[in-house]
Image (cartoon, rainbow, N blue to C red):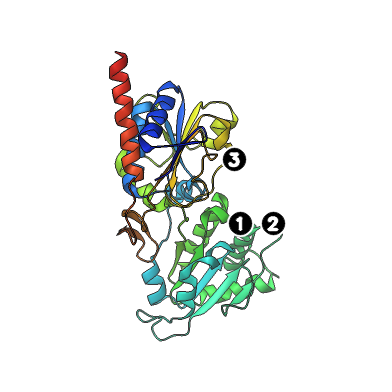
Amino acid sequence: MAAWVKGGATDADAAVDAAATLLAAARTPIVAGLCAELSAVRAAYHLADAIGASVDPVAGPNLYAELGVLSRTGAMLTTPAETTGRADAILIVGNAPWDRAIVQEIAESAPLRGRAAGAERTLLSLGGPRNGATRHVAYPAEAGGLAVSVAHLRACLKGHLAGETAYGDLARRLAAAQYGVVLYDAAELGELGVEMLQGMVKDLNEVTRFFTLPVSDPYQGRALLQLAAWTTGQAPRVGFGRHVPEHDPWRFDSARQIAAGEADAVLWLASLPAPRPDWLGTLPSIAIVGEGSPEATGDAAEIVIAVGVPGESAGGSLWNDRRATITYAPPTGQPAELTAAGVLAAIQDRLVQKKAASC
């Protein structure tokens, strides 16, 4: 297993010791990324509490595009199984959902139960890629973007906007559905767009049955959200500076903190693939990354430790898109020597030892 300290290869024990030394000297550290199996994320939260760090996942922009809306207005939600089993009309908003396997599954199936059983399924696209790989009816987005497009569509549905031929046709198709579902990516649509979309779906439920199915982010955000709730009672962006979880999505945005000079060290956790932030090398940093990833090199951070990848060289509980829940993914190959959870626990233990030795 590979480990580096200041660009030089070393063993895991030396890297753990260096990481503990770095964090012990920090006054306002950040634990970021959190794209990992749940045992590792849990260990990261425990470490953050121990060192008074703030926590910010890479999935934050996607999660917070929905959380504000959920707290203010609620949401009409369904599951992948209900969508494929019942929906006769699917509206896909934007480009991002088209990359997900569920779109092809929807396109290749028909409703089997409920009022729409046996009906032909209609696939609709608003502001999508408009390619011919999957048969669908495409409607272009407005110049103002997806949020404006959803607002115009909602206005057409409510009869507040006339003369919009294309959107008027789309509105009629949606209102005629027996069981409709809107697929969207929260980060792509944005918080205001998500709020408008949920309002539109509530309007549709005055005349038919309609729901939303937000596609999950690829960085374990849905699993992290549940762990954060049962661990801290809060959403993921929290600070442990006073050793109690304080939730503030603006204050504990890691990119903002680092740009403002509020942080002096960072621990980046990504045993699963995640985009490495530009700021990672701008302050003292530790990177715990999956073995074989592009980040598993000596120049990714001051201290780099490569660990097993969950579902490949390590087991771990991960978000399962198809089941819309957390499930266990066993290792499929030779188990790795190190796991992210084990490394984080070792760093915390070493911190405790250093503190005891200094007393």
Q: Residues within 10 Å of mark 3 (few under 14, many from 20)?
A: few
Percent position of residue 210, x then y: 45, 68
Instruction: Determine if residue 308 is in view.
Output: yes
Q: Residues within 10 Å of mark 1 (few under 14, many from 20)?
A: many
Which residue is labeled 3 in the image?
278
| Label 3: element kind | helix
Which residue is pictured at 41% across the width and 29% down the height?
A: 18
Does 57 appear above or below 151? above
Q: Are marks 1 and 3 in contact (CB under 8 Å)?
A: no
The image quarter in which residue 240 lies: top left
For label 1, the SS is helix
Q: Is residue 354 left or right of residue 190?
A: left
Kindly identify the residue that appears in the image at 47 percent across and 85 percent down. Answer: 120
Mark 1 vs mark 3: in front = 3
Q: CA distance from mark 3 to mark 2?
A: 29 Å
Horizontal and vertical percent position of residue 315: 31, 55
Count of picture labels: 3
The residues bearing labels 1 and 2 have C-alpha atoms spaced at a distance of 8 Å
Tell me the amino acid under the disc marked 1.
Answer: Ala
Residue 296 lies, in percent from the top left, at 48, 46
- 309 or 151, nearer to the observer: 309
Please, what is the three-letter code of the amino acid marked with disc 2?
A: Gly
